[in-house]
Image: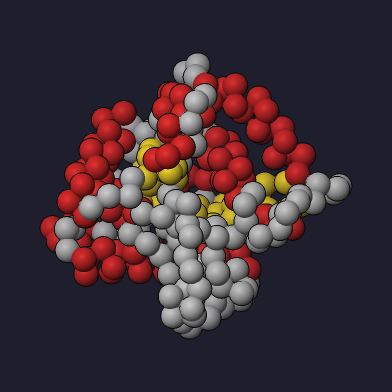
Amino acid sequence: MGRASREKTRPSLFWLLAVFVVPFVSFAAKLEFRGRDKLPKDGAFVLAPNHYSEFDPLIVAVAVWRLGRAPRFMAKESLFRVPVLGWALRKTGMIPVARSSSASAAKLTLKQSAELVEHGRGVIVYPEGTLTRDPDLWPMRGKSGAVRLALAGDIPLIPMVQWGTQEIMGRYAKGLSLWPPRKRVQVVVGDPVDLSDLRERAGERGTLTEATDRLMTAITALLEEVRGEKAPAQRWNPSEHGQRETGRLDS
């Protein structure tokens, strides 16, 4: 697996969580990795995975842990006010997503990005904001939260895909399929998305749209490789298909 980061080897609440989460996920899934060396062992990063199952966060968290980093997610700001849960989120360095005005959101993004760089932490951001609405589980239109963080702090933006989790828990399923044998889940980490030409225009709406499109294109290409088939030429857009977006990680 390679050298683990200091944040993983230093005692923390993540150790306690790993004692319970890692064996559970290992019972349900056999993770197969590609691109292990593309997740930085030190320093800040923004990891952007695809999202099509409620079980995805556990798969992604264990994958990141096995790759040597502590898995931190963006989470609803309201969750940080829940007793015990809020304490755990703060202690593990999770990042709140606040629904606020554009000016306030921009200031918050700059602050969060600076903290990631200062502490050398990574964060996992689902760029779709919710489970994909695409009927065949391809990535749909992305949102700008991940690219905003990456651009604000000149942080590596890394695409990632996992495939096979739907065999454990399908989209919108009410329960898990845990009967042996373990389900094969492929995890692929891609090369950082090149945003160097966009950083001087990071505050412009068109820039965020272009950066997000680059990210979603990279994620889709990785998934095409894993699935061995081509994605639809047009990315699924919930607003155009008359569906309501209710992403809990909406940013």
Question: Looking at the picture, how far across and down is residue 172, in whole percent?
Answer: 66, 60
With 25 as the anchor, is 248 left or right in this view? left
With 181 as the anchor, is 44 left or right in this view? left
Q: Does residue 43 appear in this view?
A: no
**Residue in view at x 73 percent, y 54 percent:** 174
The quarter in which the C terminus is drawn is bottom left
Q: Nearer the viewer, residue 218 or 150?
A: 150
Q: Nearer the viewer, residue 145 or 12?
A: 145
> Farthest residue in the bottom direction?
233
With 147 as the anchor, is 61 left or right in this view? right
Q: Does residue 58 appear in this view?
A: yes
**Residue in view at x 29 percent, y 64 percent:** 211
Q: Quadrant of residue 239?
A: bottom left
Question: Looking at the picture, how far across and down is residue 100, in whole percent?
Answer: 27, 50
Question: Looking at the picture, how far across and down is residue 170, in whole percent?
Answer: 70, 59
Question: Looking at the picture, how far across and down is residue 158, in whole percent?
Answer: 40, 52
Asked if 131 appears above or below 221 in the picture, the reply is above
